[in-house]
Image (cartoon, grey):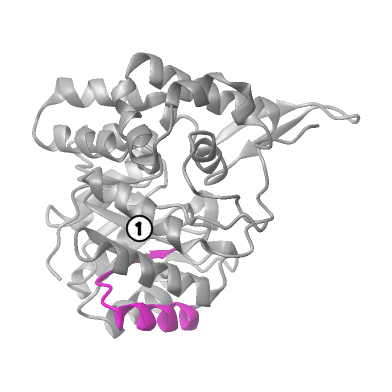
């Protein structure tokens, strides 16, 4: 596969049925895929963190990937999130989806068991890249979630040894780390942002030279995120800045932090991806269902943060959300202003 990774790849949520999220809603998955394709995205990541990979069993994991590829039907690239903290599980999952036509996979760093960078390269990334030479293998660097990190030096070795390792999803939030990746891996290597709020900085920093993003926010605004990344690569700086500014309130709610009281004192509450974006999608009338436990609901203050961000976007740049309203036949203004649509979306405490 010779695909070069450019522009926007949506880290798609996995829609759940209204049975407390016990089953995946495949009819809604098809609607979400169609919305992404209509928005012109370059591709879809199936079953990443945003797709609730930790709480899907492996049968569901593989089925969501295969169905996403089936629904996309070659109209965009589908990247399969087959990473694990077990190399054996990763190899088995990758084998299954490759049999169904998948040509690109995303491998998150092995979480919790915490291998070194050398171990990640030798015992995880390299065996998968060697076993599937015709599949693009995309390491996913996100130490804040995994507690470990594939370092640029080992990534560069992988790139030199395996022609199918030529892209990284970078979510270290460390621009110096990204600059070192570019220096060691060279110009023929694609760096994709794994943080919506850093995408513009990563793409405009010549020492990083990112070519696009694996985006959470594009779940609700695929066309706008795609246009922003295209504008950067086409040298349309003013347009890129305008779109980034219009999208900024949404970028800021991928993770929502609030201070919450209790009978024993105040504590920090961090609502992490995909809870805020899925809450926003529910608020806006998209068929996504609940998140799976142990994720739950926003706090009241967290929900108000999400609502406020969406209202800012709607007021200042309604074109960002208008395609969503048309695709799902909902009144965005009504859903953002009427408190009735917020019922059940947050904890009552």
Name the residue rendered at 54%, 34% in the picture: 283
Q: Which residue is denoted by mark 1 in the rendering?
A: 45
Give the quarter of the figure containing the N terminus: bottom left
Q: In which quarter of the view is residue 232 placed?
A: top left
Viewer-closest of 240 and 127: 240
Give the quarter of the figure containing the C terminus: top right
Magenta highlight on residue 277: no
- Residue 174 visible here: no
Question: Where residue 43 sits in the image (x, y, percent)?
Answer: 26, 55
User: Residue pushed farthest right?
Assistant: 263
Question: Where residue 344 sits in the image (x, y, percent)?
Answer: 68, 37
Question: Where residue 300 sits in the image (x, y, percent)?
Answer: 69, 28
Vertical placement of residue 10 versus 284, above or below: below
Question: Where residue 200 sits in the image (x, y, percent)?
Answer: 27, 32
Vertical placement of residue 149 versus 266, above or below: below
Q: Is residue 267 left or right of residue 324?
A: right
Vertical placement of residue 286 versus 267, above or below: below
Viewer-closest of 157 and 84: 84
- Residue 69 visible here: yes
Name the residue rendered at 30%, 40% in the picture: 222
Q: In which quarter of the view is residue 161 placed?
A: bottom left
Q: In which quarter of the view is residue 176 placed?
A: top left
Name the residue rendered at 19%, 42% in the picture: 209
Q: Which residues are magenta?
A: 87-108
């Amino acid at each position: 596969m010779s695909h070069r990774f450019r522009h926007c790849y949506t880290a798609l949520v996995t829609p759940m049925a209204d049975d407390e999220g016990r089953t995946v809603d495949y009819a809604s998955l098809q609607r979400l895929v169609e919305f992404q394709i209509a928005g012109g995205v370059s591709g879809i990541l199936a079953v990443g963190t945003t797709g609730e990979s930790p709480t899907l069993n492996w049968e569901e994991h593989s089925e969501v990937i295969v169905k996403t590829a089936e629904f996309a039907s070659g109209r965009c690239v589908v990247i399969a999130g087959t990473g694990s903290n077990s190399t054996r599980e990763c190899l088995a999952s990758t084998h299954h989806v490759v049999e169904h036509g998948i040509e690109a996979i995303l491998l998150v760093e092995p979480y919790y068991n915490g291998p070194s960078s050398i171990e990640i390269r030798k015992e995880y990334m390299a065996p998968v890249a060697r076993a599937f030479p015709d599949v693009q293998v995309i390491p996913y660097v996100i130490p804040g979630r995994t507690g470990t990190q594939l370092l640029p030096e080992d990534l560069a070795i992988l790139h030199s040894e395996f022609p199918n390792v030529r892209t990284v999803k970078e979510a270290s939030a460390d621009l110096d780390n990204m600059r070192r990746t570019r220096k060691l891996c060279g110009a023929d290597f694609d760096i994709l942002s794994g943080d919506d709020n850093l995408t513009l900085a990563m793409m405009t920093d010549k020492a990083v030279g990112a070519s696009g993003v694996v985006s959470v926010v594009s779940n609700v605004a695929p066309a706008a995120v795609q246009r922003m990344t295209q504008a950067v690569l086409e040298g349309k700086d003013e347009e890129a800045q305008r779109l980034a500014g219009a999208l900024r309130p949404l970028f800021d709610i991928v993770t929502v932090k609030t201070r919450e009281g209790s009978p024993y004192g105040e504590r920090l509450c961090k609502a992490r991806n995909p809870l805020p974006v899925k809450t926003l999608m529910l608020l806006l009338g998209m068929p996504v269902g609940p998140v799976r436990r142990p994720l739950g609901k926003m706090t009241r203050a967290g929900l108000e943060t999400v609502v406020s961000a969406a209202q800012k976007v709607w007021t200042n740049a309604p074109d960002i959300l208008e395609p969503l309203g048309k695709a799902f036949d909902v009144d965005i203004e009504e859903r953002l202003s009427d408190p009735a649509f917020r019922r059940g979306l947050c904890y009552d405490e």
